[in-house]
Amino acid sequence: MKTIQDYLNSGAVDIAPLLSLVLKKSNVELITHGDYCLTPTEKQTLSEFIQQRTDGVPFSYISGTKGFYHLDFKVTADTLIPRPETELLIDISLDLFPKDVSCQLLDLGTGSGIIAITLADKKPHWQVMATDYSHAALEVAKSNATTNIEFAQGSWFEAVNSQCFDLIISNPPYIEENDSYLEDLTFEPISALTAGQDGLDEIRIIIDNAPNHLNKNGYLLLEHGYDQQLRIIKLLTKNFTNIQTFQDYNIKDRAILAQIKNA
Ligand code: GLN
């Protein structure tokens, strides 16, 4: 017989959230029901989850969800787990257009759909399109969508034909392919994480092609690595103006916004 309290005392990784997940109880309920004895089925499920977490599987892949901004998203091993710093892209986008102004938005490499879906939910009058190269990721994004979003499969702009937008956003892969930090991320899709030797391969493609897909005065907004900002500004200067840089909540350079130069 094992009680909630016995498990809480075990020191297993993420034991409280795992107990919450299996027993559908809040943190407070875990404490107030500390003498509850788990059923054999609950024990079995919990020990499988404990084993997965001990093996390094991220908690979000076990629970199958991750909160982002004001919504909860389904995530699978086909999608990156949403990072809190990506919420910065939402704040910047919401500030960019006055309240009732409409916007044609493109989210390139949407993954689980967090950027497109969060903005579509906040701005129901915007026209939102989201793409991903991964068919499996797009299926997850579609299942997360609460409002009308156009989804298209393809590599970056190959998915959008000749359409133009007021705002193109991307949180592309940007980690250097030999970065030792990747050792901590082995359960997430590598194609969503790395972009060549300097981490900028995909950002270069996006910056080179965005001018063909931006309306007059349109914006490009990118998430990037903490040490890539100056190199990205260089890539942008040919075709873009009004370049603004942003730091995340850990005071790391994390996003860049640029407006297309009008011909
Ligand atoms: N932000 C991710 C990380 O730091 C990197 C990849 C990405 O989000 N584009 O783990």
Image (spheres, rainbow, N blue to C red):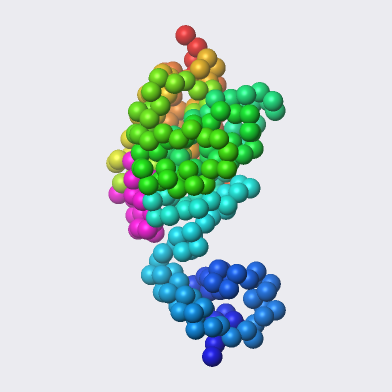
Res 127 quadrant in image: top right
Q: Is residue 210 visible?
A: yes
Q: Determine the residue positioned at 39% across, 42% down.
A: 173
Q: Nearer the viewer, residue 105 or 204?
A: 105
Q: Is residue 165 left or right of residue 249?
A: left
Q: Is residue 8 above or below residue 199?
A: below
Q: Is residue 191 magenta?
A: yes
Res 104 quadrant in image: top right
Q: Nearer the viewer, residue 71 or 187?
A: 71
Q: Determine the residue positioned at 64% across, 37% down.
A: 122
| Residue 229 image position (x, y, % from top left) | 46, 35
| Residue 117 image position (x, y, % from top left) | 55, 40
| Residue 41 image position (x, y, % from top left) | 49, 79
Res 103 quadrant in image: top right
Q: Is residue 246 visible?
A: no
| Residue 242 image position (x, y, % from top left) | 55, 21
Q: Is residue 89 above or below residue 36?
A: above
